[in-house]
Image: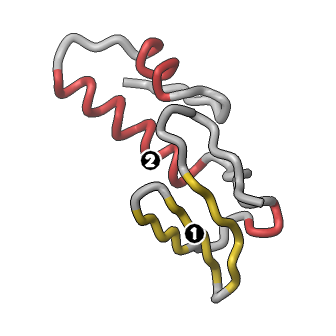
Amino acid sequence: MAIRLHPWQTLKKHLNAQPTDDVAGLQQALDAFRDYYNQIRPHRGIGRAHNRTEIICLIHNNDTTVITNGELLAEFTLDPTKGYQRKNG
């Protein structure tokens, strides 16, 4: 199955574009999206200066801290009712 993914696609749009008749096909589409989202697409949430930098993301309840090389990059209070999360401060 050829899968075309675009950086701006959401999972919902991707799944709508990849119709499947069974759970195995759905799992394949989810795996492909996850791999693309986590490994291939450019991550812009923490800035270009940290592109391709390994990070540590600490999450406790709705509080999130993003760290790299001992440097605090961001702190978030997650709002589960929103798709976009604003940085604290």
Q: Which colour scheme is used?
A: secondary structure
- Judged from the image, the secondary structure of the residue bearing numbered disc 2 is helix
How many residues crowd mark 1 within 10 Å: few (<14), some (14–19), many (20+)? some
The nearer-to-camera label among 2 and 1 is 1
Badge 2 amino acid:
Asp
Q: Mark 2 points at which residue?
A: 35
Give how far across and how far down residue 53 sits, in percent.
66, 72
Give the x, y percent position of residue 6.
63, 30
* Left or right, 28 with reference to 68: left
Q: Residues within 10 Å of mark 2 (few under 14, many from 20)?
A: few
Along the horizontal axis of the image, is 32 left or right of 22?
right
Answer with mark 2 or mark 1, whichever residue precedes in sequence. 2
User: Which residue lies at the image location 61% right of the left edge and 76% below the top edge?
Assistant: 67
The residue at which mark 1 appears reads as 65
In the displayed structure, 69 sits above or below 45; it is: below
Q: What residue type is labelled 1?
A: Thr
| Residue at the image position 44 percent from the left and 25 percent from the top | 2
Image position, residue 40 (x, y; %): 58, 50
The residue most toward the bottom is 70
Task: Please name whichever residue, 52 or 4, is drawn nearer the observer in this view of the structure.
Answer: 52
Q: Which of 31 and 55 is in front in this view?
A: 55
Q: Quadrant of residue 88?
A: bottom right
Q: Do the residues labelled 2 and 1 touch (CB within 8 Å)?
A: no
Q: Is mark 1 on a helix, strand or loop?
A: strand
Instruction: Give left or right: position of 19 versus 21.
Output: right
- Is 63 located above or below residue 7 in the figure? below
Q: Which residue lies furthest to the left in this view?
A: 23
The spot of residue 77 in percent (x, y) is 58, 55
